[in-house]
Amino acid sequence: MVNEIHFLREKLDQQFTGVFEENLIDEIVKTGYLKHIDAGDLLVDIGDEMTHIPLIIKGLVKVIREDQNEEELLLYYLEKGDSCAISYVNCIHHSQSMFRAIADIDTECIMVPVNKIEEWLIKYETWRVFIIDSYHNRLLELVDTIESLAFLKLDERLYKYLKEQVNVTHNKILTITHHEIAQDLHTSRVVISRILKILENKGQIKLGRNRIKVKA
């Protein structure tokens, strides 16, 4: 138990020293726990009861919304140091999750119990700032997603999506299937394959087997 607490403290100090005050980190160590999510596994699913919120320590999580036909649309990513503001809203209102969060790569996060959210909002200024900044950032990303859907052609959305993948993975060579891209962009694999070939002919990408090199 002592080793687990020490390990959790070490993880929090590495990521949140200078973000949270010392007393808040102490409380997170006492009440939270470390969770490992393998690539492709669920962090939270649509309809789940929200008992904890995640603080991402390592990895990458994509947040997805599902329509009436059970087709998925990628909304945004959560990276190291992030949390999901939508989770806070669900927790405060004791409502079920409207979104699905899936680990894009192996991920570690610290799970904080929901009954601490409002208490810490009153008690700790750094927690208030963190929550407000998180909500603001997720809102901007949602607006960006909506604008892409409304104003960009699919080839522009696809190239923008690939560049965003490069930014979040910090790698110009993406290991991803055409089917996965189609799911994220809410279209068919055949359409994605066709547009990827067009982008390759333009010299913007280089296609391989389940690999895409983004050149610009």
Image (cartoon, helix red, strand yellow):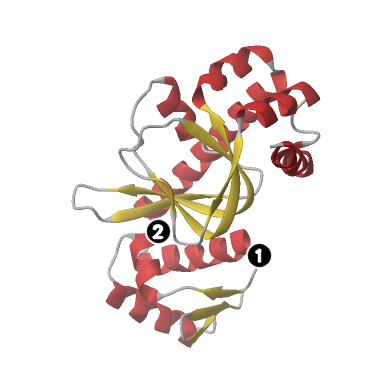
Give the amino acid at mark 1: His
Q: Residue furthest front?
A: 1
C-alpha distance separating marks 2 and 1: 24 Å
Residue 44 found in image quarter: top left
The label shown at residue 170 is: 1
Task: Identify the secondary structure beneath mark 2.
Answer: loop
Q: Is residue 100 above or below residue 28?
A: below
Whether tag 2 and tag 1 are in contact, CB under 8 A, the answer is: no
Asked whether, in this view, residue 140 is left or right of residue 98, the answer is right
| Between 29 and 97, the one nearer to me in the picture | 29
For label 1, the crowd category at 10 Å Cα-Cα, with few meaning under 14, some 14 to 19 and many 20 or more, is few
Asked whether, in this view, residue 173 is left or right of residue 26, the answer is left
Q: Which residue is mark 2?
A: 152
Residue occupying image coordinates x 35% and y 79%: 193
For label 2, the crowd category at 10 Å Cα-Cα, with few meaning under 14, some 14 to 19 and many 20 or more, is few
Q: Is residue 8 above or below residue 154?
A: above
Residue 127 found in image quarter: top right
Q: Is residue 161 above or below residue 77?
A: below
Q: Position of residue 20 (x, y in %)?
A: 74, 29
Image depth: mark 2 or mark 1 in front: 1
Task: Identify the secondary structure beneath mark 1.
Answer: loop
| Between 47 and 169, the one nearer to me in the picture | 47
Q: Quadrant of the C terminus?
A: bottom right
Residue occupying image coordinates x 65% and y 49%: 80
Q: Position of residue 92 (x, y in %)?
A: 44, 21
The label shown at residue 7 is: none
Asked whether, in this view, residue 168 is left or right of residue 46, the answer is right
Give the amino acid at mark 2: Leu
Q: Position of residue 108 (x, y in %)?
A: 60, 50
Q: Quadrant of the N terminus?
A: top right
